[in-house]
Amino acid sequence: MLRIEELNASYNNILALKGISIKVPKGEIFSIIGANGAGKSTLLKSISGLIETKMGRIFFKNQDIINLPANRIVGLGISQVPEGRQLFVRLSVKDNIHLGAFLYHKRRYRKDINEKIQGVYRMFPILEKRSEQIAGTLSGGEQQMLAIARALMGRPELLLLDEPSMGLAPLIVKDIFGVIKELNETGTTILLVEQNAKAALKIANHACVLETGEIVLEGLAKELSDNPRVKEAYLGG
Amino acid sequence: MEKITFATQLLQYFITGLTIGSIYAMVALGFIIIYNVTEIINFAQGEFVVLGGLVMVVFTVSAGLPLVIAFPATVVLVMLVGILLHRLAIRPIRKPSVLTLIIATIAASILMKGTAMVIWGKDPFDLQAFSGRDPISFLGAIIQPQYLWVIGFLILITISLSIFFNRTIIGKAMRACADNPDAASLVGINTTNMILLSFALSAAIGAIAGIIVTPIALMEYDRGVSLAIKGFGAAILGGLGSFPGAILGGLIMGTIESFGAGLISSAYKDAFALIVLLAVLFFKPSGLLGSAEISKMKRF
């Protein structure tokens, strides 16, 4: 589904990714783990188009998307849940969700949009209760749910999740990972970036380890979690 | 008798102030629409007003078009100028900082003023009032019918903008760009187009202001600067970024100017607006309706 070849990308004039090549098969959960500053977010932003200073090839469904701007890439079926949620904090929960389907408003799929909204409300009932509230006033967990809901409104085939557990209480992290698993079971391919390596490896099929902009390990998530090096560096021994 | 006359006089100042304040409010709205999406203060905003008045003169006086055709034609033409301003002065700048973009709008405003002088000369132009010049008497004060048009248009613009930004997906997308441009492009919003739209919208409001104020106050090529300063003052007074603030700020600015000119001296008419602007910046930089929290995050 997604194939990255020899990707170099810079962020703030620093070369943050060096020769990254990965393949994300359709229907899988693929996790990228690594320390702070290893380049995980830069990788996701390069795929979604937020980072434009990059070289290499990024194939999505056999189309090279490396030169496309972010607002075109989402139309192809890649949605990103960005690090730190990045909600429209001054707009209402409802407006955030509506804007997630921005491309479909233009294409006049009003009825589909309403069905889709009902769908995300079923997944996150709390958002329906808070629909008139300003997004910036939600709790951290609710904001993360809203960020996921907004991304889902774009009907992604590939969902990019950047640190969905960041700053959340363990119980809520469990909920969020449950939702990710559920989304995957209904057919969405997922590329997950996480510092919480244990949780990320547990739900993934394949995974890779990113260190200072390079992939140092790659393989089945199970194998990686048994790897002594991963155990020591990321799983707390 | 003396006392009643004074009261009537105050009422007269108030009505005149509201009218001129409506124009300032429209200029302030123009500033805010662009500011909210881009953080740019577009100093060519006053030129849109001037162009609105002068182009309308060409269409009605020179070309003899009826009002109902000339009005929208003028608005569309000035909108095109707004789009050109974005295309030629704003977008070509590589790696722009907000400050360079603001300076670009100052340059554009000087250029537009110069061009207007070449085309229209230095003389002020008059336009026919929309529904005649027979004054209406109201509690002893004199109201020009055109005053009502001005206030009416401010109400119309306010309602339209509020529907546009709160009810339509494009309006919400513009607010989303202002709120978080990266997230906006992640949901598929073309942020460049939204910026373009904000320039077109501001130009349209400026043009309307120019068209309706010309029958009251005439229009000449170099009025843009003073209109821009007063509109900017109104926007700051209301809290830069707030729509209700811009309208309130404009009305207050116009009323202060009118009372100041009437009761103190009309020679200092333009000074009052600047005094208000300075006072706000000294004592409450976040403005009347702006939140201090947000103003801390502002770069300008």
Image (cartoon, rainbow, N blue to C red):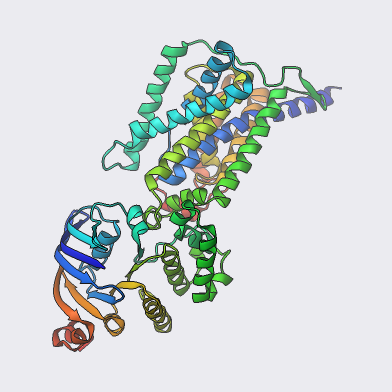
The residue at the point 29 percent across, 56 percent down is A49
Above or below A48: residue B298 = above
**Looking at this rendering, what residue extends furthest in the front direction?**
A62
Is residue B243 toward the left or the right of residue A230 in the image? right
Above or below B165: residue B102 = above
Quadrant of the image occupied by residue A14: bottom left
The residue at the point 72 percent across, 23 percent down is B145
Is residue A26 toward the left or the right of residue B227 in the image? left
Total numbered labels placed on residues in the image: 0
* Whether residue B39 is visible: no
Above or below B213: residue A63 = below
Quarter of the image with the N terminus of chain B is top right
Quadrant of the image occupied by residue B211: top right
Is residue A93 toward the left or the right of residue B151 in the image? left
**Looking at this rendering, what residue extends furthest in the right direction?**
B1
Residue B130 percent coordinates (x, y):
67, 21
Nearest the viewer among B289 and B264 is B289
Residue B269 percent coordinates (x, y):
58, 24
The residue at the point 29 percent across, 85 percent down is A202
Is residue A181 toward the left or the right of residue A101 in the image? left
Residue B92 percent coordinates (x, y):
29, 36
Residue B191 percent coordinates (x, y):
39, 47
Quadrant of the image occupied by residue A143: bottom left
Quarter of the image with the C terminus of chain B is top left
Nearest the viewer among B54 and B287 is B54
* Whether residue B204 is visible: yes
Nearest the viewer among B10 and B36 is B36
